[in-house]
Amino acid sequence: MKYIISFLVIILLSVINSYAVYSPLKTENPRITSSFGEFRSDHFHNGIDIGGNLLEIYPIDSGELIYYFDEVDDPTRRVYGVGNVAVIEHTNQTRSYYYHTEKNSLNKKVKSVTTNDIIALTGNSGRSGGAHLHLTVEDMSQNKVINPLYTVPAFKDDRPPMIWGIYLRTEPALIHIREGMSIRYSGEIKIFVKANDFTGNIPLGLKNVKIYMNDKLMREYDFEELIIKDNVYYVKPEYTFEEVYGVDSHFYRGGVFSPSRGQQYKFTAEITDFGGHTVTLTRRVNFS
Ligand SMILES: [Zn+2]
């Protein structure tokens, strides 16, 4: 029995670590400027952004360079969106994508790459508001993109996340609720939680968000991966972008309810970041 358990533990550990790869930038403390699954006006951010200009980019694992675009090769083509790009396919049916690279920095000579080969330099090509690397990791066997913060162990997260408030959307108001406040309203109400993680002072997305009403779990979002079905991205368990976010960036939807008069309602938000910090906030509201 003891052997079976340790065998199972070994299998479990190897499954968890199966995506463990290397940091694409060999800098001491890579600065994450945008995280996975974040709000992008009408879609989820499908990778992470790492800030820095003209930094050497290395593949997160060995593989084959299967696609690249460098504007110097085709000056007639407009550079937009992802900008100059390299795509590397790895043995375990995963692909890694490196966007916004510096013009004329792509290393096109090497077909097979190892984690010691420089692919390109970070830049500001395409739709980009400052020099950075955008990294996306795709698992083709399961039609999903994986959160690189899980796969790249180098990223540290020392600062806990923050809950700015629990909000109730009545028609037409968005109410930031204070503890014990009274609201006179009888129609349908939408619950929102505004929360985010940080690196330094830059607001980032979260790993996990749970929103409860009267201790009942209304919504849970887990940003470990985004599942792709018919070109639509879903966050776990199965929510589209519009079902997760509302109002503005970092506002997570907590479901809908119609309050009963004379009742007290309790709302709780529980959020977790990639460093494993969990923060909760509870607010009670009386409806009359
Ligand atoms: Zn990005």
Image (tube, grey):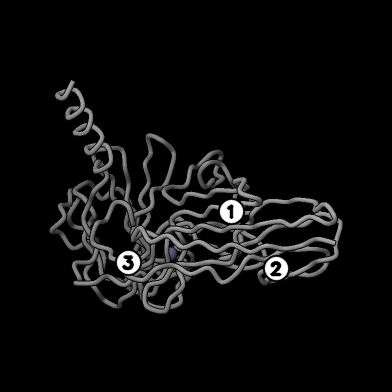
Q: Nearer the viewer, residue 225 or 177?
A: 177
Q: Is residue 104 visible?
A: no
Residue at 36%, 41% in the rendered image: 139
- Closer to the eye: label 2 or 3: 2
Quarter of the figure with the C terminus: bottom right
Q: Amino acid at mark 1?
A: Ile
Q: Nearer the viewer, residue 24 or 208?
A: 208
In terms of secondary structure, where does tag 2 sit?
A: loop
Q: Provide the residue designation for mark 3.
A: 157
- Closer to the eye: label 2 or 1: 2
Label 2 or label 3, whichever comes before in sequence order: 3
Q: Is residue 111 above or below residue 123?
A: above
Q: Which mark is residue 211?
A: 1
Q: Position of residue 73 (x, y in %)?
A: 33, 65
Q: Nearer the viewer, residue 271 or 16?
A: 271
The CA span between labels 2 and 3 is 34 Å
Residue at 56%, 72% in the rendered image: 164
- Is label 3 in contact with label 1 (beta carbons under 8 Å)? no
Q: Provide the residue designation for mark 2.
A: 180
Residue count near mark 2 (Cα–Cα under 10 Å), binned few <14, some 14–19, many ≥20: few
